[in-house]
Amino acid sequence: MNDQRKFTDADLSTPFVEVALWEVTTNCNLRCTYCAVSAPGYRGSNFDLSRIGEVADGMAAAKVRLVQISGHGETTIIPHWEAICREFTLRDIAICITSNFSKVFSDSEVDALARMTHITVSIDTIDRKLLKSLRRKTDIETVLYNMTLIRLQAQKLSLTPRFNWQCTLTDAVTTGLADWFRMGTLCGVTTFTLGNLLEYEALPDSPLHPARLDLPELLAACEDIKQLSLLASASKAELKVQPGIMEGINESLVRFGVKSPFRLPQPQPSSISW
């Protein structure tokens, strides 16, 4: 079993960590309607990158095989963030990232991304207008352009990074899940993740967790999710469903008096791991 944990100063002497999650920044270039970054008074912070060598040495000593250089924030807004990658590759540590792909990447950024093993792109829908309303400042054309550049560079390097599309599942996007999946597969995406929405009282304009819907809309959302699962199975793509989605839906169904729990057509992972 992988030992996955947040990597902090206290972990530098850990004898063995297979996968490390390193949050380079909690700042972001977007203000998604459902994200804590949009809450009044939010203040993010950046890691002191002058210590990157120390961090990389610590991870190498702990026999880290893969480091995710992202967390709550958007790593690619840090100036020269791609220099971080070199410190890890010099120590034979593989790299993955979660990014919103909302800016056009430079050649050096594209090269760094092309050398990663896994790339998770945060994209909730392929509906351009809806995407802009949910994830402000995001344009799907930029997302797809970046993906194409990265795949092109990876091909030149004889590499094949795996793309994962992650959708924060809300009532606003369930009807478009099938098209979201189809577009992703056309773009070479092999893994699709439904992310569990964490609701914040300070964000009254946030869309809703599907579990908050009235019964007719909830049942329709269940059908949309089911169809997504069937599409993924037929395409031999991997579909991951984060904890909190199925549990929340089934708790609501019970409250509405529905006796049969909602289940996907095939078993799904209960946690996110690579």
Image (cartoon, grey):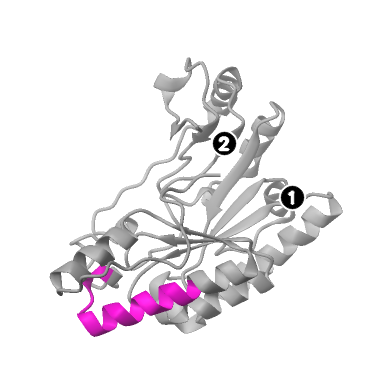
Q: Please, is residue 57 above or below residue 155 in the view?
A: above
Q: Earlier in the sequence, mark 1 or mark 2?
A: 2
Residue occupying the far front of the picture? 260
* Residue pictured at 74% horizontal, 55% vertical: 107
Percent x, y of residue 42: 28, 52
In this picture, residue 185 sits left or right of residue 6: right
Q: Amino acid at mark 2?
A: Val
> Count of labels shown?
2
Where does the magenta region start and end? Answer: 211-228
Q: Which corner quadrant of the image does residue 201 belong to?
A: bottom left
Percent x, y of residue 208: 27, 71
Percent x, y of residue 66: 60, 35
Residue 224 falls inside the magenta stretch: yes
Q: Please, is residue 135 above or below residue 172 in the view?
A: above
Q: Secondary structure at mark 2?
A: strand
Q: Secondary structure at mark 1?
A: helix
Q: Nearer the viewer, residue 24 or 158?
A: 158
* Residue pictured at 35% horizontal, 59% vertical: 196
Q: Residues within 10 Å of mark 1 (few under 14, many from 20)?
A: some
Percent x, y of residue 253: 21, 71
Q: Please, is residue 100 above or below residue 204 in the view?
A: above
Do the numbered discs 1 and 2 sit on residues whose CB atoms are within 8 Å? no
Residue 9 falls inside the magenta stretch: no
Could you say which disc has been placed on residue 67 in the image? 2
User: Please, what is the dominant secondary structure of the magenta stretch?
Assistant: helix
Give the residue at mark 1. Answer: 111
In this picture, residue 252 sits left or right of residue 113: left
Q: Nearer the viewer, residue 249 or 254?
A: 254
Residue 64 appears in the figure = yes
